Image (cartoon, helix red, strand yellow):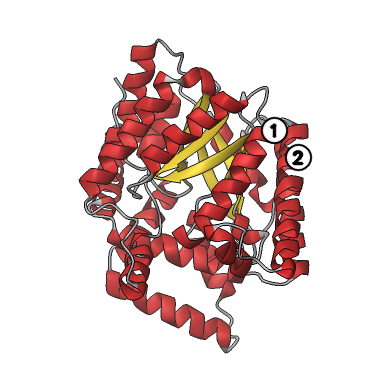
Amino acid sequence: MISFDNTEIAFAGKSDSDLQWSYRLFKMIGMPWLVKFGKVATNVAFAIHLPIKGLIKKTIFKHFCGGENIDDCKGKIEELGRFKIGTILDYSVEGKTTEGDLDRTRDEIIASIATAKNNKNIPFAVFKVTGVAQTSILRKANGGAEDLSEADRKELAVSMQRVDAICKAAYEADVPVFIDAEDSWFQDTIDRMVNAMMSKYNKEKAVVFNTLQMYRHDRLAFLKKTHLEAVAGQYFVGIKMVRGAYMEKEREAAAKDGYPSPIHATKEDTDRDYDQGLAYIVEHIEQFALCAGTHNEISSLRLVELMAEKGLDPTDPRLFFAQLLGMSDHISYNVAHEGYNVAKYVPYGPVKEVMPYLLRRAEENTSVAGQMGRELSLIVKEKKRRKALK
């Protein structure tokens, strides 16, 4: 049985100084007031051109990111690979709007796919549709293309061409690609794009993966509907399953605009749907490939149990566990140590451009009940274990 309390395995990749730094960082992130202050202070500092890039790069950026470009990430890729953990290179630049910037993001994703093609330690690529499409057109098209103007339709087609170029590159390189889930007011448009790409490129196996945020109360039904469509269309379904990253934002938008919140009322409902989603996919694994993106110990163990019940080998290439770099190493390293397929999301990009991602990580960690306490308790346990050996 996998033990998530084995800190020797969990922190095997960290030196004593790395461990001490992680302890200090999580202590700081555990203070909501400090995170809020840091968000404002960082934005102000960049706005008035204060020289804080070096400080950020040596601290929070170093912990949660692989580097500023693909070459910078090579050391982290090799380090994770030594512990049988794959890397998912995640170009985490957000908020671009010009056609030139959107094209450059497309090209960067394709470059990450080319890097993965030649590296066994990079099992997947990933991108956000909002990184290669105008958010305004994604939102307009969310209810369907019927009411779009001719100009809107052309813009949507250009966006689809970028998505197709990435998926085609993934198919030709034989590198599966995750398309991330986003805000609900974009997601229907994204789902239609992903389904079109799956039907085109997933004829032999799952290359294109959709992402399901299971804190949405409609996603379990959507999963089953997607499966039936794939059976009818004779293609495979790739699913990355997560709990979700935009809960407060979604609820605030629903309350402000007067529509029902798409988010489950309780965490227990989310946990139930997540685990039921795992069970459904494993039960129909002949049609699926799954990446279980979770920092939840119970769900991680549940997938291990489901695989055993189905008689699936831990190395079955259709099944992966994944966590974010810098978080939940006690899950990633212990699961990998037992021979299961594990990968870490490794964000990269220029420091200033990646700050929205980093600040969101910090805010999420302060808001997830028990997350900081668990991370800190394990770090303290490992520090004591190492001290006792000296």
Residue sitting nearer the eye, 71 or 271: 271
- N-terminal of the pair, mark 2 or mark 1, is 2
Label 1, on which residue? 201
Residue contact between numbered discs 2 and 1, judged by CB atoms under 8 Å: yes
Q: Point out which mark residue 3 bears.
A: none
Quadrant in which the C terminus is drawn: top left
Amino acid type at image mark 1: Tyr
Farthest residue in the bottom direction? 48
Residue sitting nearer the eye, 178 or 158: 158
Q: Residue at x 57, y 57 (%)?
A: 144
Quadrant in which the N terminus is drawn: top left
Residue sitting nearer the eye, 310 or 108: 310
Tell me where residue 290 appears, x and y as whole percent: 49, 30
Q: Residue at x 37, y 36 (%)?
A: 331
Amino acid type at image mark 2: Lys
Say whether residue 69 is visible: yes
Label 2, on which residue? 168
Please give left or right for residue 71 compared with residue 250 in the image: right
Tell me where residue 89 appears, x and y as whole percent: 62, 46
Q: CA distance from mark 2 to mark 1?
A: 7 Å
Tell me where residue 30 appears, x and y as whole percent: 28, 63
Please give left or right for residue 336 compared with residue 248 in the image: right
Q: Residue at x 51, y 17 (%)?
A: 286
Say whether residue 385 is visible: no
Tell me where residue 288 appears, x and y as whole percent: 52, 25
Secondary structure at numbered mark 2: helix
Secondary structure at numbered mark 1: helix
Classify 10 Å Cα crowding around label 1: few (below 14), some (14-19), many (20 and above): many
Q: How many marks?
A: 2
Please give left or right for residue 162 compared with residue 231 in the image: right
